[in-house]
Image (cartoon, rainbow, N blue to C red):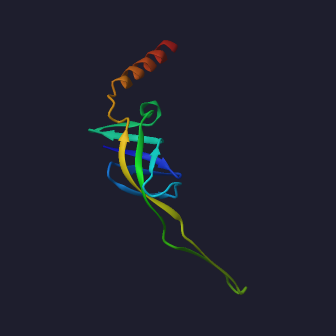
Amino acid sequence: MFAVIKTGGKQYRVAADETITVMSLAGEPGESVTFGEVLMLARDGSSELGGEALQGVSVTGTIVEHKRGPKVISFKKRRRKNSKRKRGHRQDLTVIRITGIQGADQDGGGKPAKAKAKAGTNKGAE
């Protein structure tokens, strides 16, 4: 089973006991973090995509460490002008170990009923 979560403006595919590196998050090493924005959930050959189907599903993890990414150098030179600029940047990152996916153990029995109700509403409106 795996899930796709969104944090820091990026999407990550996560599963239990994996380690991911995300943009800096508040918290100390050892603290628990919960990601409520789950975009997709896949289990036993079936998948569910966003919306109402994934309400109540969350991914939890533990902060392992805070670190900094590799140095990126920005160098600009204007030829024949004796002008140049060199700047470096290192992004702050947080390493997280995924501990589990909550709310994924529920039976998806309610999902088809909602789909039938919506389909019935659309047919009656035509």
User: Which quadrant of the figure has residue 34?
Assistant: top left
Residue farthest to the top, as pictured: 124
- In this rendered view, identify the residue nearer to me: 12 or 121: 12
- In the image, residue 69 lies at what x, y percent? 49, 68
**What residue is rendered at 51% in x and 58% in y?**
23
User: Which quadrant of the figure has residue 88?
Assistant: bottom right
**What residue is rendered at 68% in x and 84% in y?**
79
Residue farthest to the right, as pictured: 81
Q: How many marks?
A: 0
**What residue is rendered at 53% in x and 64% in y?**
92
With respect to residue 22, does 45 lie above or below?
above
- In the image, residue 45 lies at what x, y percent? 27, 39
Residue farthest to the left, as pictured: 44
- In the image, residue 78 lies at what x, y percent? 68, 81
With respect to residue 30, does 5 lie above or below?
above
Q: Quadrant of the N terminus?
A: top left
- In this rendered view, identify the residue nearer to me: 123 or 21: 21
With respect to residue 114, does 89 lie above or below?
below
**What residue is rendered at 33% in x and 30% in y?**
106
- In this rendered view, identify the residue nearer to me: 11 or 77: 11
With respect to residue 50, does 15 lie above or below?
below
- In the image, residue 121 lies at what x, y percent? 48, 16
